[in-house]
Image (cartoon, rainbow, N blue to C red):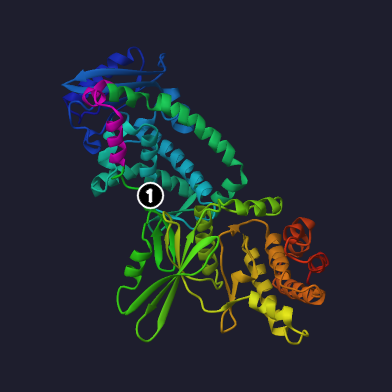
């Protein structure tokens, strides 16, 4: 029977659904929550979900006018409905009503259980997409639960934009807290279940993906299979899942349908611009706190915010850069100077980089898109900072404009030490330089022990401070897991291009210094040995002398395990 607290209008809906059901038993019945959705006019249709046991027609729509209000009943067989909830069998054609606010007229317990199952599955799919979109940042991404709610709803609008009119009331900033809590309830319950399954964990009010889930997503070949699965579901979602909305939209909104033109469609898309960006609820950590991925602060705004008081003069100057745009912000307060580096990540679409990618094919895959490299830089830099390594502090990030704000570190890059070795007359002159290289080998071994690879280990990407500390730079090719031998090979063979034709002795000294440091910190000897393979040496043969390559490769191949 219908819940006794509902009014005569609900009773009439129940009576009509009873007529539709015929001999079939009603498993559950719900009505869209018009107050939350804002469907308060007579012309706006009211969605009704009717789940029937052993329904022979499987899935049908029944429009009806009750008390001068348009309703559309979606009648669905229970088995088909539950498959759609747990598997997306019809692209949420039958279960999509549980995504939006509803009032249960019959069997609220059943509907709530199905709602949690549906939202749990949709959250899992969003989490998998996060690991694909942010493969490195996903390890430390902080997510507000609101992200899942907004992203799920907006995904439906992206397929069928006119749905905007039905849900705009819950997607704008003005949605009050009471409504928000009502909308979030099912997502929070689903998240709590996922926490028990060790898919996520809560950190304060934020959701964080578990390392176990991220690594599992990467190990299993979900990229192609997930794309195939999503493509199938998009087709079902377009044809079936949105079919009720299409019929409602056309049949019940005649005044709007009659005016539907390019101009009115443009209004639909314009309306979506006021919606909350789901990425507002995704955050990346920096030394200054969490920063939303939807943040759009530019260089000028950053200067005004970061140097709000006490600075007499501020300059922004171009700071070189070939693969990326680099700027330096200099601020003077009358006594001292503060410097900040701004890095804008460009896409490497120029033809001049194509030969490099072809030449390194089989040895190393490069991240070329600016957004991907920015993500890697943020993720690995913050990870290494938390693990106690010397890296520049991240101050702010603007993912939309691909801007990264970092502290400026005083020092000179390690290529200066290599050049000193190259020009020295004997080893006693460059012994201190070799000691620095040994310490760098120790550092790389410790980083590799954390299952992180740096990806771009040229000497220029290590700074030696005036105090003698090593500071690592440039993590835009870095990743969790990957080819550790590439890190070793690139450092050694790139270093070798500074050495002269008669530099065999110095090449061996550099290689031995690095290898000794690496192995003394429990580095894997096999990583060193593999760095001597031809697949690495051929990449650097275009600018490093063959005798230098041979000496360094032999040093790697002959490396012995330290006891």
Let me know if residue 257 is in the magenta part.
yes
Residue at 29%, 40% (x, y): give it.
Answer: 270
Look at the picture and state if 365 lies above or below 412.
Answer: above
Q: Position of residue 431 (x, y in %)?
A: 73, 84
Q: Position of residue 110 (x, y in %)?
A: 37, 31
User: Which residue is drawn at the image coordinates 54% and 55% (left, top)?
Assistant: 136
Would you identify the image quadrant in which residue 400 lies? bottom left
Which residue occupies 41% across, 43% down? 190
* Local SS, label 1: loop
Q: Position of residue 63 (x, y in %)?
A: 27, 18
Specify whether 287 is left or right of 75: right
Q: Is residue 522 magenta?
A: no
Report the quarter where the C terminus lies.
Answer: bottom right
Image vertical order of residue 336 relative to residue 463, above or below:
below
Magenta stretch, residue numbers: 251-272
Query: Where is residue 397 drawn, in percent x and y?
Result: 43, 61
Q: Is residue 294 left or right of residue 498?
A: left
């Amino acid at each position: 029977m219908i819940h006794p607290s509902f009014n005569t209008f609900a009773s009439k809906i129940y009576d009509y659904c009873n007529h539709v059901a015929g001999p079939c038993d009603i498993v559950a019945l719900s009505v869209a929550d018009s107050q939350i959705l804002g469907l308060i006019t007579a012309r706006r249709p009211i969605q009704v979900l009717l789940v029937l046991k052993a329904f022979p027609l499987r899935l049908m729509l029944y429009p009806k006018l009750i008390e001068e209000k348009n309703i559309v009943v979606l009648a669905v067989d229970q088995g088909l409905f539950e498959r759609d909830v747990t598997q997306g069998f019809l692209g949420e054609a039958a279960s999509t009503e549980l995504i939006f606010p509803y009032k249960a007229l019959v069997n609220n317990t059943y509907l709530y259980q199905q709602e949690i199952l549906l939202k749990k599955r949709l959250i899992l799919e969003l989490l998998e997409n996060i690991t694909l979109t942010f493969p490195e940042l996903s390890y430390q991404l902080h997510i507000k639960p609101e992200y899942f709610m907004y992203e799920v709803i907006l995904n439906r609008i992206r397929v069928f934009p006119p749905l905007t009119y039905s849900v705009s009331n819950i997607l704008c900033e003005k949605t009050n807290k009471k409504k928000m809590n009502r909308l979030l309830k099912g997502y929070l319950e689903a998240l709590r279940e996922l926490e028990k399954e060790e898919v996520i964990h809560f950190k304060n009010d934020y959701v964080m993906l578990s390392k176990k889930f991220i690594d599992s997503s990467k190990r299993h070949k979900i990229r192609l299979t997930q794309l195939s699965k999503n493509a199938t579901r998009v087709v079902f979602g377009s044809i079936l899942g949105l079919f009720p909305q299409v019929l409602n939209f056309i049949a019940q909104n005649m005044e709007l349908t009659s005016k539907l033109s390019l101009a009115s469609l443009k209004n639909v898309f314009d309306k979506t611009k006021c919606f909350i960006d789901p990425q507002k609820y995704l955050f990346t950590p920096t030394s200054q706190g969490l920063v939303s991925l939807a943040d759009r602060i530019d260089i000028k705004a950053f200067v005004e915010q970061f140097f709000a008081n006490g600075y007499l003069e501020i300059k922004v100057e171009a700071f070189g850069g070939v693969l990326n745009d680099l700027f330096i912000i200099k601020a003077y307060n009358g006594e001292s100077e503060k410097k900040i580096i701004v890095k804008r990540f460009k896409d490497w679409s120029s033809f001049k980089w194509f030969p490099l990618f072809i030449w390194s094919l089989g040895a190393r895959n490069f991240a070329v898109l600016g957004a991907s490299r920015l993500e890697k830089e943020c993720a690995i830099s913050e990870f290494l900072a938390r693990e106690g390594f010397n890296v520049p502090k991240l101050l702010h990030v603007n993912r939309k404009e691909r801007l990264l704000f970092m502290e400026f570190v005083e020092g000179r890059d390690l290529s200066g030490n290599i050049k000193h070795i190259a020009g020295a007359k004997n080893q006693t002159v460059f012994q201190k330089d070799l000691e620095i290289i040994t310490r760098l080998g120790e550092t790389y071994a410790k980083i590799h022990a954390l299952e992180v690879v740096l990806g771009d280990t040229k000497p220029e990407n290590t700074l030696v401070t005036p105090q003698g500390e090593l500071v690592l730079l440039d993590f835009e090719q870095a990743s969790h897991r990957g080819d550790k031998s590439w890190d070793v090979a690139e450092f050694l063979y790139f270093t070798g291009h500074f050495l002269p034709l008669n530099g065999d002795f110095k090449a061996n000294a550099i290689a031995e210094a690095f290898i000794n440091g690496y192995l003394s910190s429990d580095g894997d000897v096999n990583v060193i040995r593999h760095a001597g393979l031809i697949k690495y040496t051929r990449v650097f043969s275009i600018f490093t002398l063959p005798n230098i390559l041979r000496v360094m490769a032999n040093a790697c191949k002959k490396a012995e395990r330290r006891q």
